[in-house]
Image (cartoon, coloured by chain):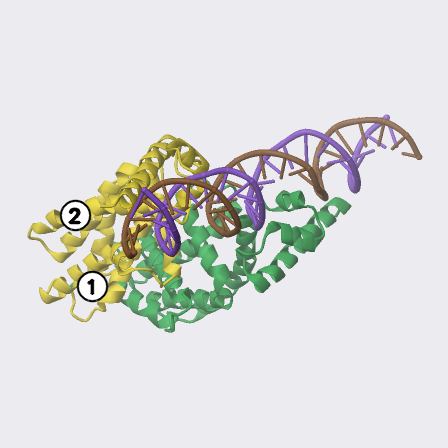
Chain colours: A green, B yellow, C purple, D brown
DNA sequence: ACTCATACATGACTATAGTCATATTTAAGA
DNA sequence: TCTTAAATATGACTATAGTCATGTATGAGT
């Protein structure tokens, strides 16, 4: 690896670490780029060579976290159980891990929703990361259809949209500082409703 | 009405009209407060006597629009039909009207979600406005339970959350510039799924 | 009509994200 | 080693939302 490449990685990690510390200390919104660059001992312009916006840094934090969380999700799905329970497990597992840093999670759910507006995600890597959950849910639904757990007449894409919407909203509501219920139970009941149907 | 009160209303309307024109011309994000106040012939500080933030102006636009739209929603519900169809009608009607100003709608859905984070809405009026849709849906569900359209064992609050989440996400997705499907059909199918259930 | 407290108007000022022309560093070839 | 092009670093600069001390208009009480 060339000196250039080494320095690049070093600087990015430097920004990442300093920012992480400052965010923990004072929160994302009240930490300025000026502070980060000063603390990191780099010029302000340098920051923007690594992250095009402040939000991009946030998203990078999210990606690092997701890299770990999603690598563990396979274990959650290993047990033999119904499609319904698998979906419940995945969503509860995500929320459980996201709970460790509520502020980051809130801001990221928000960023996620912001980008519903745009279709053009730069790289395929970008897409994969952003749509990891969508992929998992639609795979589970398809498996469910094959195994007879899920009605075969459903539109998988639409159903995935329904479940994702419910998940993200429930997550946002649960992340409110004053909420004091169990996310797992809340989402479990909602998923039961979607499976059973609310009509009589 | 005193001179003071008259002037206050006049200034607010002035800001509202000028801003409306500029937003139409160049969009919300690329219109600055400086431009609005200059065009309106008032000092910059004056703006903030009427709207605490730029977003508050946006919300005001949304409230004015909702005032009209929600006053018409009674008609939509007048016809005799199932709870399921009523919910479909309400949501399709809202989207139909929101379509006339997509940018405003997108930004407002976004603001709405932003404020899921906070519980403390200043006045009761605020709450009423913000929760109009929630009220309508939960009323319809309760009516549905009474009339036997909806399973009596459901949790109305949770079900309302489910439907609201689906509605807002579907709306966001539909508002994307390149979408070319009918919102009414999309939401109708999704609501059918929630009523019938996706489990087999 | 005069006084004065209160509401309202104002623009200079601050904070901060992001830009960009310029300077510096690196890597590769002669 | 010397030259040079490309990558990277930098901080002065811009744009813009929001603040606040100060000035001005209004209305109530006398």
Q: Is residue A166 left or right of residue D3?
A: left
In the rendered image, which quarter contains the C terminus of chain A?
Answer: bottom left
User: Looking at the image, which is closer to me, D23 or D30?
Assistant: D30
Q: Which mark is residue A198?
A: 1
* Horizontal and vertical percent position of residue B10: 29, 39
**Do callouts 1 and 2 point to residues on the same chain?**
no
Q: From the viewer's perspective, is the residue at label 1 or at label 2 nearer?
A: 2
Q: Secondary structure at mark 2?
A: helix
Residue C20 position (above or below residue B108):
above
SS at mark 1?
A: loop
Q: Position of residue A86 (x, y in %)?
A: 38, 66
Q: Nearer the viewer, residue D20 or A133?
A: D20
Q: Is residue A91 left or right of residue A153?
A: right
Residue named by callout 2: B71
Total labels drawn? 2
Res B179 visible: no
- Measured from the top left, where is residue B79 in percent x and y? 7, 50
Residue A145, by quadrant, is bottom left
**Vertical arrangement, residue A181 with respect to residue B55, above or below:** below
Q: Nearer the viewer, residue C4 or A123?
A: C4
Q: In the current view of this chain or complex, which residue is farthest to the left?
A: B80
* Residues at marks 1 and 2 touching, judged by CB atoms closer than 8 Å: no
**Label 2 is found on which chain of the structure?**
B
Residues under labels 1 and 2: Cα distance?
28 Å
Left or right: A159 as drawn, with respect to D1: left
Residue plotted at (54% across, 53% down): A58
What's the residue at 25%, 61% (across, down)?
B160
């Amino acid at each position: 690896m060339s000196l250039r490449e080494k320095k690049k990685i070093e600087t990015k990690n430097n920004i990442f670490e300093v920012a992480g510390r400052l965010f923990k200390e004072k929160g994302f919104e009240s930490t300025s780029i000026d502070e980060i660059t000063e603390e990191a001992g780099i010029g302000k312009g340098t920051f923007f060579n690594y992250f095009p916006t402040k939000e991009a840094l946030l998203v990078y934090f999210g990606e690092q976290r997701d890299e770990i969380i999603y690598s563990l999700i396979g274990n959650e799905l290993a047990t033999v159980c119904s499609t319904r329970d698998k979906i419940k497990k995945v969503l509860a597992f995500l929320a459980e891990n996201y709970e460790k840093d509520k502020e980051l999670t809130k801001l990221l759910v928000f960023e996620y929703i912001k980008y519903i507006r745009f279709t053009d995600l730069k790289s395929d890597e970008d897409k994969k990361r952003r749509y990891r959950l969508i992929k998992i849910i639609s795979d589970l639904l398809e498996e469910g259809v094959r195994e007879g757990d899920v009605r075969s007449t459903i539109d998988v894409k639409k159903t995935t949209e329904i479940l994702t919407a419910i998940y993200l909203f429930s997550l946002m509501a649960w992340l409110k500082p004053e909420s004091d219920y169990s996310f797992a139970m809340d989402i479990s009941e909602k998923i039961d409703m979607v499976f059973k149907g609310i009509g009589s």
